[in-house]
Amino acid sequence: MCGILGILAKGPVNQHLYDGLLVLQHRGQDAAGILTSDASRIYLRKDNGLVRDVFQQHHMQALKGNMGIGHVRYPTAGCDSPAEAQPFYVNSPFGLALAHNGNLTNAAQIKDELFREDLRHINTDSDSEILLNVFAHELQAVAKLRLTPDQLFRAVSAVHRRCRGAYAVTMLIAGVGILAFRDPYGIRPLVYGKRETDQGTEHMFSSESVALDVLGFARVRDVAPGEAMFVDVNGELHSQQCAEKPVLAPCIFEFVYFARPDSMIDGIYVHKTRLRMGEKLASKIKRVWTSHDIDVVIPIPDTSRTAALQMAYALDLPYREGFIKNRYIGRTFIMPGQAERKKSVRQKLNAIDVEFRGKNVLLVDDSIVRGTTSKQIIQMARDGGAKKVYFASAAPPVRFPNVYGIDMPSVQELIGNGRTEAEIAAAIGADQLIYQDLGDLIDAAREGNPKIQKFDASCFDGQYITGDVNKDYLDRIEQARCDTVKTGRSMAQSGNDHVSAEVLTFPR
């Protein structure tokens, strides 16, 4: 999961990209990068860390030009080395840079093809660098000295034929323009907006519409699955469908957890979806737990607040804020390593014991993935004096890895895998556990845009939309990316991180 931006403006874009990445920081807290272009010259700054830490004043001053792309990263494929921070850049043909949100499921195959057939060197383990080199090779095969939109679209079509998985992409072509495209299923989000100025129209692409709002761009529409949109240096917009059989099947976990509630994705308001999730979960409680003795509904901040508030309203129960959140701690779900996640939960949340003392409490969370957070929070509620602690999940049990850009690589790390709801409740220490039904979750999202016939819900039902994910693939990513492997790899690399940053991070 990552956040991406692309802007072509009439003036400098460095500050716009910085401000946009701040708004998308929730999509990745491991690394950040901005690449700009002034005429045919490219300027790049990227490194591990939060946006505010990666970019200092002298970095911003050096990022010159009226067009650029930005990226905030949470690593899935690859590792957390600064060498794998994005954007990535290649100097042939034309000078291409890429920012990618998603995950290629056939990256290993393509990497081998790039070496053996395309004669291209891949310097990292990132599938984003692979995607960039596939596009570069395909563009080189069709491009002439004077690059045209048709040549770009032909290259994107070739990418669709070769690559599998999820990819929302913004690209910068030095001296030429900004290109954005989305995989044929539209798994990861990408939206286009524009802003009218005295100098002319400015164009922007973003993972979420909230970045458009903050920068004063009007949301025009989402990039369609399989579509490519290109804005040349003169500000002229071109678009074309580049996939043979595109089908819109956005990742439903965006609406559960990843996206900000003030975003609109594929015509669906995230906030309204979460309200409907709360309504449907309340209806289930009324249906299956008619004699409940819940005294109060308390959300686990922040993403569950909307659903919890609507649940309390529908159940005619008091709603209370029972936990105070430390906003300077990153999203625990995407932290590497169980020990780090457990420590960070205690740093992140503190209970207001007066809201728990002597009460039967219904805690509401957006989802239960590993169970680490849920177990600790339930214990906090008991320590605060709660008589009984019930737990409601606004999403169904997460039983399968989400391979399309969310790091749930190991089924052994998923508390929902191979357990009944009663066994999960016992494992996290809840007196009762209520899960959202998958059908209700899908209906809650689809109500915002009835035209969407299918959502990628693979982490809940194991049905992988791209059709190329099997047990062998899942076993490979588990061996490569489980907590134990990542922890060992991080320790091995920790002594060399400064070298990678020194080599790849510029200007200074």
Image: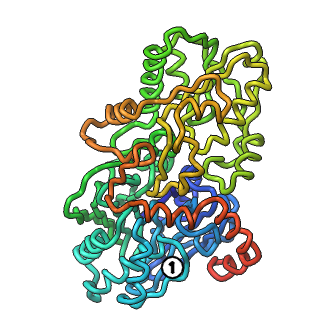
Residue 359 placement (x, y as % from top left): 71, 13
Position of 470 with respect to 149 (left or right) is: right
Residue in the image at 78% along x and 19% along y: 385
Mark 1: which amino acid? Ile
- Seen from the viewer's position, the closer of residues 456 and 464 is 464
Name the residue tied to disc 1.
42
The answer to whether residue 175 is visible is no
Element at label 1? strand
Residue in the image at 39% along x and 59% along y: 202
Position of 375 with respect to 307 (left or right) is: right
- Seen from the viewer's position, the closer of residues 393 and 132 is 393
Residue 245 placement (x, y as % from top left): 20, 59
Residue 479 placement (x, y as % from top left): 56, 65
Which of the 4 quarters of the picture holds residue 180? bottom left
Q: Is residue 33 above or below residue 387?
A: below
Position of 475 with respect to 169 (left or right) is: right
Classify the position of the C terminus by image quarter: bottom right
Q: Residues within 10 Å of mark 1 (few under 14, many from 20)?
A: many
